[in-house]
Image: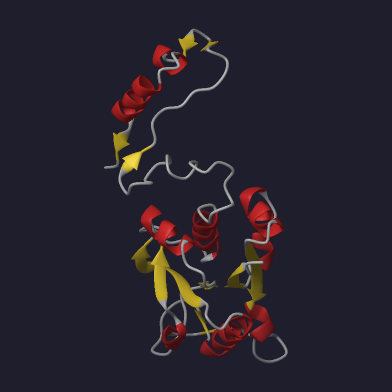
Amino acid sequence: MKQAIKYQVITLFPEMFEGVFGSSMMWKAQKDGIVELTTVNLRDFGLGPRRQVDDTPYGGGDGMLLMIEPLWRAVEHAKAQDPSAKVLLMSPTGDRWNQASAQSYSETAHGYIFICGRYEGYDERIMQLVDQVISVGDYVLTGGELPAMTIIDSIVRLIPGVLGGAESAAIESFSDGETLEFPQYTRPEEWNGMHVPEVLLSGNHGNIAKWRAAHSQKAA
């Protein structure tokens, strides 16, 4: 039996992932043994009796930084569970995530370790262990948890066997890198005076394909 791909998330708030990892396609992917989704509590690697994980930056400035020691040890712990895993750091300064990225990552056999930042950032020395820095957009969030959830969801759903239909991913928005999905309809045929386009009811698959192509939009 093929071994489940490991996705480990280093975070100060592992409880944030309980609902996401325990629902919908994420739950199904784990139930079917396709992926293994776990969290690593950064606080477990904190220093001293208070499990300290942050400190003021050298050179002055507002806010706190995640310290190198807890981060380093947390990554080492995750690596011990999956030595071939790639380490990804969530940051608005990173490479922009898109559908092509998700597709590429879904085709790999190794796992991933996600580092979720907090406060004003992290000690730069952690970059020695990081394989890629990833951004989900040009904005700042409270932490890296939401980006990690978004990225993991976008990858896992593309792994073969996770989505129900074989063509489900192929017709989605951005599946070719630029095209948005065409409009779709289901029952009833009429609702509040609004009707399903006749061509979709015709059974003529050639005409339906032409209609869908004509009504797909190019991403800006």
Q: Quadrant of residue 171?
A: top left
- Locate residue 91, reporting x and y percent: 42, 69
Residue at the image point whose x is 44% and y is 58% from the top: 102
- Locate residue 71, reporting x and y percent: 55, 84
- Locate residue 131, reporting x and y percent: 42, 78
The C terminus lies in quadrant: top left
Residue at the image point whose x is 54% and y is 55% from the top: 153
Q: Quadrant of residue 137?
A: bottom left
**Is any atom of residue 13 visible in this view?**
no
- Please determine whether, in this image, residue 27 is positioned above or below residue 69: above
**Is any atom of residue 68 visible in this view?**
yes
- Locate residue 103, reporting x and y percent: 42, 57
The N terminus lies in quadrant: bottom right
Q: Residue furthest top?
A: 193
Q: Is residue 167 left or right of residue 211?
A: right
Q: Residue furthest front?
A: 1
